[in-house]
Amino acid sequence: MDFNKLFARVMAILTKPTSEWPLIAEEPATTADLYRNYILVLAAIPALCSFIKMSFIGMHVPFMGPIHVGVGAGLRGAIVGYALTLVGVYLMALLINALAPTFGGQKNPLQALKTVAYAYTASWVAGIGQLLPWIGVLLTLAGAVYSIYLLNLGLPHTMKCPPEKSKAYTAVSIVIAILVGWTVGIIAGNVAGLGSMVHGTGGATFEDSEDVHFDANSPLGKLEQLGKRAEEASRKLETAQTSGDSEAQNQAMREMVGAVLGGGAQVESLAPERIKPFVPETLAGIARSDYSAERNSAMGMQISTAEARYTDEGTGRSLGLEITDMGSAKGLMALAGWAVVQQDRETDHGYEKTYKSDGRMMHEKWDSENRQGEYATMLGERFVVKISGEADSIDVLKSALGSLDLAGLEALKNEGVKTD
């Protein structure tokens, strides 16, 4: 992946779109190129910034102060949101392509994907605004508006529609984008809520040539490998697009999601009955009072969750246990190191920190005033286990987590993994 070229394109489409769109329309490209060299990287910006904002910076609510989404829930929401954004881009391209004749344009699936990818650039880059105070809202809004402007400029070049019909074409496309975004948001919200924590730095070596070589074990190296895996899957997607076979397109899209999220493999998350043995009848000496488990599927992705509540009727205190199998997002969990989320923060009433211990990512949070906290770990780059609730100290939560069969659960990290 040529990051210099990527940066140059982003700057060009944002600062001189009138001259850049004709170049984009005429340059040779493939679906694989667009996803690997552009979409996968740019679409990650708002997902990553949202995660940092919600789980670490916090969202200020009037009269209530800052509110933080649990690190687990934040990470799962970011992963699912990112994955569904990739799917949403593809859906938008299909719909823009289908609408082309209605507005005097020419159908071309590759040009439609170009249209969506480059028009979305402003909105993706403006996702950084989530990390800023109140002015960030204005930046995010400006990004959305500028993306609409870019779409209006681009359609006559990429889809060959008459300029006088571009505004109407844009208006209909925006309505579709809102509907697609709304659907993606619902799906992401329904499967969000887990635990996680990661830090990584990666190196690159620069030689005399223009090539950049990343250490295979670094975060950027892993991202580069992800791109290579997606390339083969996207070739099938490109063939399916031109075939007109909707079932072939759906299958190709599922394979691409597996390539991007599953680390090169299609992963079937654990069935509820496979998770239940890891949910004990008692935890920290407290009997289990409630239990539920489910497996959710959306657009080729699977995520399984199990939740249990342990309540001490005498004291009224309770503990919660959550086990999440990221399943189809196993590959992105392995990439979690590039999210830069190692943390150590203290307040007047407690602390929160994320770190690595014995090869596992850990997250702990404690409120000494209310005697509440949470303690979580990531296993096998696939499972997240979290204990939360009221206790005399964080040590109670740590002991409760340590009493679980974590090694047994981690041993299932390859179950349901299907490689070609």
Image (cartoon, helix red, strand yellow):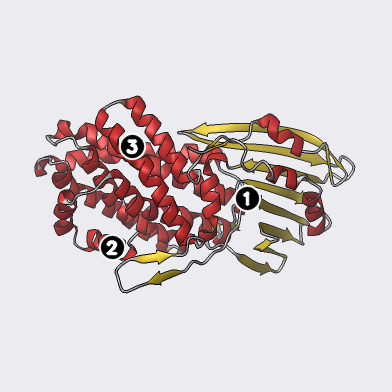
Q: Which residue does the numbered mark 1 point to in the structure image?
A: 195
Place of residue 346 in the rendered image (x, y in percent of width and height, measured from the top left):
67, 69
145 shown above or below 104: below
Asked whether the residues under the numbered discs 1 and 3 touch, taking CB atoms below 8 Å apart as contact, a structural biologist would say no
Tell me which residue sits at (66%, 50%) in the image: 379
* Tag 2 residue: 5
Numbered mark located on residue 29 in the image: none
Q: Is residue 4 above or below residue 313?
A: below
Pointer 3: what residue?
Answer: 237
- Residue 360 position by quadrant: bottom right
- Would residue 153 be visible to someone looking at this image? no
Amino acid type of the residue that numbered disc 3 sits on in the rendered structure: Leu
Location of residue 361 by image quarter: bottom right
The mark nearer the N terminus, 1 or 2, is 2
Q: What residue type is labelled 2?
A: Lys
**Left or right, 201 with reference to 291:** left
Separation of marks 1 and 3 at Cα, in angstroms: 32 Å
Q: Earlier along the polypeptide chain: callout 1 or callout 3?
A: 1
Q: Quadrant of the N terminus?
A: bottom left
Tell me where residue 275 appears, x and y as whole percent. 70, 35
Vertical side of 249 occupied by 127: above or below = below
Distance, label 3 to label 2, CA atoms, is: 24 Å
